Image (tube, rainbow, N blue to C red):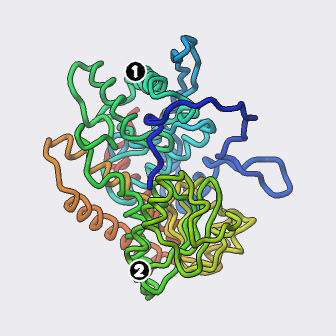
Amino acid sequence: MPKKDPAQRVKKKTTERKPRPPRSLVQRKNTSLPISVFENVMKQFDTAAEKLHLDKSILNFIKVPRRCTIVNLPVKMDDGSHRMFTAYRVQHSIARGPAKGGIRFHPDVTLDEVQALASWMTWKCAVVNIPFGGGKGGIVCDPFKLSPSELERLTRRYAADCSDLFGPDSDVPAPDVGSGPQVMSWFMDTYSMRVGHSVPGVVTGKPPVLGGSRGRVEATGRGVVICVREAAKHLGKHLDSCTASVQGFGNVGSISARLLHELGVKVTHISDVHGAIHNPNGIDILNLIKYVEAKKTIVGFPDTEKIDPAKVLTAKVDILIPAALENQITKKNARQIKCKILAEGANGPTTPEADVILDKKGILVVPDILANAGGVTVSYFEWVQNRIGYFWSEEEVNRRLEEKMVTSFDDVMRVAIKHDVSMRIAAFMLAITRVVEVVQLRGIYA
């Protein structure tokens, strides 16, 4: 099941660790130069844009973030001291609507990573054709080393210091790595107190009692599985005869694994931050979720063998879902990937160099800006429900999500077939076309 909201954790004493390099960077072979996540998304954009033969001045306008904000937040700690936290908010585009994107609480957050995630959000919203642009935020911190009261003060300070950016018509945050419904509740309250009335539509991912949408917690994983199902149909495969491997067992990975299991797929390989497990006959996902709730790890689950986590990506399975971090499938390991369908639950798990290899191998890659767009789609549903003051049942939310994801998958597949390109290039081509159309109609204010 999803990891606990860090707001519910009690701060524990921990030994000091040496700083890790930002997880948004991986080392290039035979050189110390890093590959940045933002560089990757720019390469993806350029590859698709070249095939569209559009006005380069407009492409340059929509390619780069419109605004990058860096703030230093003074926060009072429980011991009475004050600590400074660096935080970011990037608005990549507001051409199609308010900037939309989560707030990440993680010690390795960088501006490069936040810019990349904001860019992906622009293209993701355009692929599923919802009226949002792309945004993303991040605070450099370890939320699991903060007490609930420290986390609350940090959240409220960020919301207050950046309040000129946020609003239901300008920039709508959501939960991301290290944050959750409680963080969104504090954020909404802070913004509402500053404007003098309740504004539930300023954030999404809230608890239902505060105006959150039912079905939001499962939405990203559900969207991934809908895409897997549609990809299997395209390849003429029956899911009840398929095997799967899932990298990452947080919110997206655990829900994807459960829903695949319910469709008859044998999930044989799973990893989390602590290790990886394998059962060739299929892992009992429902009991594994209960085990993780108690043990906080998948390692040691009965009737499984502990394996090297790298084997989760290279296992001989029909379906692979990378649902962990960026830059996991690279030029170094792409040739060992053996799946037929690769559905990206995480943002940016595959580098551009690896994409070329996977395409040559004939692997159907459902890209992140389509596969994991279920989360932002239901966030859009939440925003709509907040604006109209009327709330749908979970069944209605799931029905609308199903319709939106199937339509978007079909739209991308049509572009891929028409232009004889990969699903990723097709998704970017579709998204870029939709953003350019709006920019041309609105014009560029000068």
Q: Residue at x 55, y 41 (%)?
A: 115
Q: Quadrant of residue 106?
A: top right
Picture coordinates of residue 171, whole percent (x, y) = 36, 36
Q: Is residue 236 left or right of residue 390?
A: right
Q: Is residue 437 above or below residue 399?
A: above
Q: Quadrant of residue 298?
A: bottom right
Q: Is residue 241 above or below residue 253?
A: below
Picture coordinates of residue 90, whole percent (x, y) = 49, 36
Q: Secondary structure at mark 2?
A: loop
- Residue type at the position of mark 2: Gly
Q: Residue at x 36, y 73 (%)?
A: 410
| CA–CA distance in space, label 2 to label 1 | 48 Å
Residue position for label 2: 264
Picture coordinates of residue 148, whole percent (x, y) = 45, 28
Residue position for label 1: 160
Q: Residue at x 41, y 69 (%)?
A: 225
Nearer the observer, 131 or 403: 403
